[in-house]
Image (spheres, rainbow, N blue to C red):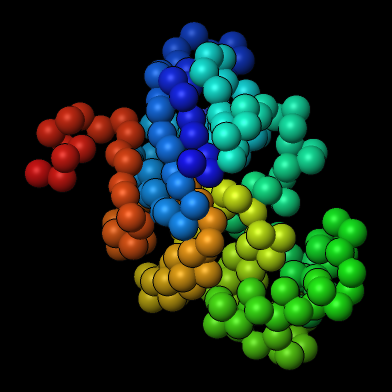
Amino acid sequence: MSVRLEDVWFAYPGVPTDVLAGVSLAVGQGESVAVMGPSGRGKSTLLGVAGLILKPRVGQVLIDGQACTPRDAPQLLGRRVGWVLQAVNLLPRRTVLDNVTVPLLAMGWRRREAREVACDRLVEVGLDPADDREARTLSGGEAQRVGVARALAPGPVVLIADEPTANLDARTAALVGRALFSAAKQTALLLATHDEALGALADRIVRIGEPPELADGS
Ligand SMILES: Nc1ncnc2c1ncn2[C@@H]1O[C@H](COP(=O)(O)OP(=O)(O)O)[C@@H](O)[C@H]1O
Ligand SMILES: [Mg+2]
């Protein structure tokens, strides 16, 4: 399994109640799981634990079979563990291609290899690598697709996507969602969304914070 949460309990500092109480979840390579449920029930917290931002009080996170904690984040984040967030944070005055290439160069990739991989990932999300517009002029859906290409370019084991289409209109969200799922085929995709149409693209849906009669979809 590419990412596995084993009996994870998590509470925010100074808050007596657990947001996550005994959560276990595994996502394999090439598999996608959508975490769904009402706002405030712990979707982002679950992703934060899986994505090495938050340290569980009890339980553990395994990435590629190895137990990992936020201490490992400096080595793993952006490389083995990729993130796509609701608000994509692009280099505003750089091109689409630069936005995907620059982080690879910062990781020590050779320029030629970085450009090749960046071009491939951009094509996979439906963007033109030769598009020389500055990122600040892109539409919301284009910018979010650059964010997906950027997160996938280093070849992460796990891609964590927290409400990646929440800022977009329904049509654009569907386009970005399809690009995300098709580009993420090689990785374990763990997505949080309240968009049923986006969740339906996942191999599995995990519902949190809902009574059982809702959780089974009836
Ligand atoms: N930094 C924080 N400190 C304290 N409580 C938090 C913090 N972040 C989130 N929470 C609380 O944890 C619960 C789950 O939040 P979250 O994981 O963001 O839910 P979701 O993503 O499903 O909307 C909520 O009650 C929220 O108020
Ligand atoms: Mg959230």
- Whether residue 42 sits left or right of residue 75 in the image: it is left
Indicate the quadrant containing the C terminus: top left, top right, bottom left or bottom right. top left
Q: Position of residue 56 (x, y in %)?
A: 57, 21
Q: Which residue is situated farthest in the left direction here?
A: 218
Say which of 58 and 88 sits in front: 58
Instruction: Please determine whether, in this image, residue 16 is positioned above or below residue 128.
Output: above
State left or right for residue 187 relative to residue 74: left
User: Against 128, is 83 above or below?
Assistant: above
Q: Nearer the viewer, residue 188 or 217?
A: 188
Q: Quadrant of residue 72?
A: top right
Q: Quadrant of residue 212?
A: top left
- Displayed quadrant of residue 73: top right
Q: Residue at x 60, y 50 (%)?
A: 157
- The residue located at (85%, 56%) in the rendering is 107
Q: Please tell me how many numbered marks the rendered image carries.
A: 0
109 lies above or below 22 = below
> What is the x, y in percent for residue 33?
39, 49
- State the image coordinates of residue 179 (x, y, percent, origin top left): 48, 72
Q: Is residue 214 left or right of residue 36?
A: left
